[in-house]
Amino acid sequence: MHLKHRTSALAAGMVMLGIQPCWALDEAKLDTIVVEAHYNNAVGSSDAASQGTVTAELIKNRPALRTGELLEFVPGMIVTQHSGDGKANQYFLRGFNLDHGTDFATTIDGMPVNMRSHAHGQGYSDLNFLLPELVQRIDYKKGPYFADEGDFSSAGAAHLRLADRLPQGLASMTAGSHGYLRSVFADSFAAHDGSVLYGLEVSRNNGPWAAPENVRKYSATLRYSQGNANDGFSLTAMAYKNTWNATDQIPQRAVQSGDIDRFGTFDATDGGTTSRASLSYAMRKRSESSLFEMNVFAVQSALDLTSNFTYFLNNPVDGDQFRQSENRHMLGMNLSQAWVNSISGIEVRNKIGAQTRYDHLAPVGIYNTIAGVRTSTIREDEVREASAGLYAENTAQWLPEFRSIVGVRFDAYRFNVASSVVGNSGRATDHIVSPKLSLIFGPWEKTEYFANLGSGFHSNDARGTTQTRLADGSPSAPVTPLVPTKGAELGLRTEIIPGLQSSLALWRLDINSELLFVGDAGETEPSRASRRTGIEWNNHYIAAPWLLFDLDLAASRSRYTQDDPIGNYIPGSIDKVASFGVTVTDRGRWFGAFQLRYFGPRPLVEDNAVRSVSTALAYGRLGYKFSGKTRLSLDVFNLFNKQASDIDYYYASRIKGEPAEGVSDHHFHPVEPRSLRLTLAHQF
């Protein structure tokens, strides 16, 4: 963090970004500062060591292979892919293989990205509709310690905030390896006492795959805003459509035998199409001692995803290809009111809030297909899922160097399922109470200390809450609708070394029921209770105004807490993550970046007998400014051309000619080979 003026007052570093710390509402009492930063993780800026903010400056200056890699700015997060680039990414954090987003909540200006009861996976979080150039900042949190965080947030949450206006218009064109093309046009202008912001993206990509990916992606954003971050509103419309061919994970034995190469496939008709349209309204109204916030959103989305993970295991003649499909309408609203006062000389902040959401899926289904053509229905459902969450939070500044935060959250859910499978229709309800507590000590010697404790939850797929039998007719017990989680964290944050922001966190998270990936269905299912423990060390160092270093290290241990003879390791759970980055800006006409990320080997089966290999990848950027408005940059991905995996699984599949019961094997999706992308960008 580089500040023209430093202050140790709690929360001062967040005011100019429009972020209000938990207790400071009267910004007139705070010193005016100017922030020239990549991160805002200063002492006094948050309520936990694992909470922070990333600014647009760093997002702009770091190369990214995929849109979803925006979430890799969250320290300790790894973002990969096991299929085509038109679907949600795979996410890893704090000992989790989060699949496509379960237990990590993501929002855009308060509008949720995670999808409940999704056709492809619970908590499905697809960020491909977003234009990274329009993101103003990312506010991230980890752990279930925050009263305003609900479903899917036990491991963490990221709140992406869009800009209301751009300092200059932007036109850019990117061309790269494997047929990659991307064009972006964005600008803002004054209109009717406010500002209009718009952005357009068109992209194409074939990738290195034997069956070209043939991505056809279109995204658009239109936003009208008035006022400022403290007293104003915005109305945002977003639209997105994408079609692609997919190369899913492949069996190691097929590559070793030469049947296919690393970028080959057994079914070139896999792929998908998806769309999303949304309209959202956000407003903030501040008085001298209070703050009112409201978000309202409406989303329509659709997905058709055709996959084949097991090839000819279940259908030795026509193959095991299947389609997951859904059409969704989602409505929701978030309200909060916060106010400050003084009681017997103690500064107190109280906040209450309400969050509602309604999802209507008509239909959500899974079907048998041959070469992408639907042949039969496995199951098809209409789902109505509604939720309401209420929370209250009290923050008290007992001493200049000690404050407490006490919160409680109540969530209630209602599920209504109409199923094509006899016995699976019905209704279910559930509710859960989640208390929270944080104690913050300091700062002393530019160091503060945190103790955080809290309960959270994740919801299960609505179809499981009323299910009494499987599609094959065998009996099945309904799953618990809302699964409790409990977490704790001890941490510190320090700026004792000039220019260095460093944080350390020791954490634990218990979940009453783990969600696991099922290979032959491409879905998740509930499993045993689990516990994760870990340590994280994050560092951001401004060596010079033009030179930034980042180093993030994380280690964790993940186990089932209910013993089973098959073993207690959690398949896919990540245990080591490391990332190192160097960002160079404004060094004459030159600029650049280097990013190295590592995620360690993972158990693929419960007894740890089969493990994945580790993956280490490097990205690089070299850029040149022709003028203050025109720049040319070259991004290189997989700089050292490593042969590694984006994702690894172990399950049974069958290639033609193999035994009917199939062969249990390591299945992997390879990282893309070294690729180059050249971008010409002009500001106007």
Image (cartoon, helix red, strand yellow):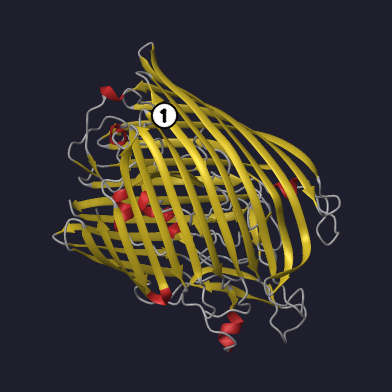
The answer to which of 445 and 33 lies nearer the viewer is: 33
Q: Left or right: where does residue 184 sit relative to residue 557?
A: left
Badge count: 1
Q: Left or right: where does residue 301 sit relative to residue 284?
A: right
- Residue 258, horizontal then vertical, whole percent: 57, 89
The answer to which of 99 and 603 lies nearer the viewer is: 99
- Residue 592, horizontal then vertical, whole percent: 24, 63
Q: Which residue lies most toward the left here?
A: 588
Q: Is residue 378 above or below residue 535?
A: below
Give me the residue at 41% from left, 42% from top.
223
**Any part of residue 100 in sight:** no
Q: Quadrant of residue 282?
A: top left
Q: Quadrant of residue 47?
A: top left
Q: Is residue 513 above or below residue 344?
A: below
Residue type at mark 1: give it: Arg
Q: Is residue 314 above or below residue 6?
A: below
Give me the residue at 43% from left, 62% from top.
202
Q: Which residue lies most toward the top here?
A: 344
Q: Which residue lies most toward the bottom here?
A: 258
The quarter of the rendered structure image containing the N terminus is top left
- Residue 115, horizontal then vertical, whole percent: 59, 49
**Any part of residue 590 in sight:** yes
Residue at numbered disc 1: 284
- Residue 661, horizontal then vertical, whole percent: 76, 77
Tag 1's secondary structure?
A: strand
Label 1 neighbour load within 10 Å: few <14, some 14-19, many 20+: some
Give me the residue at 37% from left, 43% from top.
52
Q: Left or right: where does residue 335 sit relative to residue 626?
A: right
